[in-house]
Image: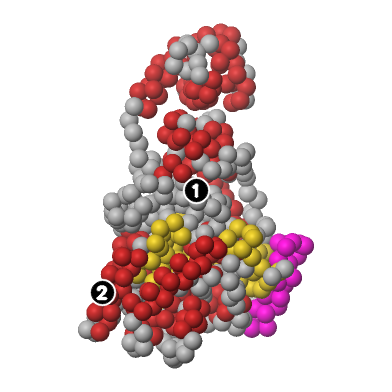
Amino acid sequence: MKKTFRLFLLLSIIFVLGAFTGRFFSDKISSEDVIGAAKIAGLELTQSEIDSLLPGLEDARSSYIANRKTTIPNDLGPAIWFNPLLPGMKIPTGPDKVNFGKAPLVRLPQNRDELAWYTVRELAELLRTRQISSEELTRFFLDRLKKYDPQLHCVITLTEDLAIAQAKRADTEIKAGKYRGLLHGIPYGAKDLLAARKYKTTWGSVPYQDQILDYDATVIKKLEAAGAVLCAKLTMGELAWGDVWFGEMTRNPWDTKTGSSGSSAGSASSVSAGLLPFAIGTETLGSIVSPSTVCGTSGLRPTYGRVSRHGAMALSWSMDKIGPICRSVEDCAIVFNAIQGPDPQDVSLIPAAFQYDASADPRQLKIGYLKKDFDRRYAFHDQDSVALEKMKAMGFKLIPIELPESPDLSIILSAEAAAAFDELTLSGRDDLMRRQIKNAWPNSFRESRFIPAVEYIKANRLRTKLMQDMQKVFDQVDVYVHPSWGGRSLNITNHTGHPCVVIPNGFRNGRPTSLSFTGKLFEEGKILNLAKVYQEATVHHKEHPVL
């Protein structure tokens, strides 16, 4: 068994060494190749052991070459699936129980430009009471997208024809009394890693900028079923890293000299600038939280296994998550309610009920806070300190907690991303990508080819230990508050799959700051309720940039 592991480990490394030196297909594997691979793997081998390995390495290499002849599309996942639930965990079951509370009293503003800053809930009431039509509202936001995109570079493709058709259908249905709910007739945008039939799905990347996937992602289908109107495919960092895509860098509406952060760059930028009421983003390791922080939007990163990823670009099969970016927490709850739930095309989904009651008092929750993180001097320290005092003044009792120590699990994302885009690396088409620096995907994909399979599996075993340790944290509290940036919560919870809500909580040097709330697996309702009650006692989400 020991020799089998050595064989597998060494062959993985030798296979890459040969491919990158140009000797792979012509030369036999030599003792020197094995010695170099063993050094990377941390193994010490005698010459006798090396001689015993060589025939098996050659045979296994032939198997690898044969496997490469099969084209593997990005949407074909591995036959192993991550499950964030541990034995004995309880999650909400039964039917969804959702109460959004009483509708607001809203009147159509005399200055139509003010509609840019209305929430989904407010716009929904205007549409329901037929003070404005979906077609009028859609054309209003399409015009704003056209007007301000040259400044912000947040749009890859306008889906104008589709939007007008969907808006007209919504108007016909609403007029006939067939009201589908709070998203009926509401315009929105989707990060351009979600497939939309007849439109390009570019993944923000040069090698895929003309790609058309002739089907709709499940999230797109669910929003269409809710009556929402797709206006644009929005920018994303190339293959979901950063805010630079094949056309430009997406800008922060609060300071257009700077980027909007990534990778849900266009989603956050467009909502922040009032170009759309809401947008769909994704997060693997911060891609909803970070751009929401920079752009001053409210975002929800749901529990892993909550929202179907069918039709979404795969970056990390065990970490990718899809969620809403909105003007308010209430809007996040509304959009999440529409996109969450079962889908037979995504085997990673876990059946759980969404329980949300806008009228519930979150003061009944056990609320923790990361005292050591908040006590440090960091960029948002002053704004976060004010937020904590505000929560205490509102009657929230905050319990100091600490997160467990976390091992370095970065190779999990690195290995899965490299596997998802292995064809791009081996074909050399990664040279087409815009960012070719050390800290970018092309170099990361190549580095990841040297990660031994044994180390990847070991990291996932340590991940299980981290999940167990986090469960002990949630034995103490229902929710905890923490800095959005800095500290270890963002990294830990993206690996354990816990949900997070991020909201604006002030400004620093003229740019937004944010605060985050993290909760138990599949209990988005509690963190949404807590964040909503706190947010509605502040005004930060009502501020907007001047373009």
Horizontally, is 180 left or right of 427 in the view? left
Identify whether 286 is placed above or below 52: below
Q: Main secondary structure of the magenta part?
A: helix
Q: Which of 475 and 93 is in front in this view?
A: 93
Residue at the (75%, 65%) spot, across then down: 375
User: Left or right of 331: which side holds 130?
Assistant: left
Instruction: Compute the Cα span from label 1 to label 2.
Output: 34 Å
Q: Where is residue 435 in the image (x, y as percent from the top left)?
A: 56, 43
- Hey, what amino acid is under mark 1? Phe
Q: Is mark 1 on a helix, strand or loop?
A: loop
Q: Does the magenta stretch include residue 27?
A: no
Q: Residue at x 35, y 65 (%)?
A: 160
From the top left corner, tell me how far across and down residue 474 is, in percent. Answer: 56, 63
Q: Is 540 situated above or below 320?
A: below
Outermost residue to the right: 377
Q: Which residue in the structure is indicated by mark 1?
A: 246
Residue 202, position as x, y percentages in the image: 41, 49
Magenta span covers which residues?
371-396
For the residues carrying marks 1 and 2, which lies nearer the camera in this image?
Answer: 1
Q: Which residue does the numbered mark 2 point to in the structure image?
A: 169
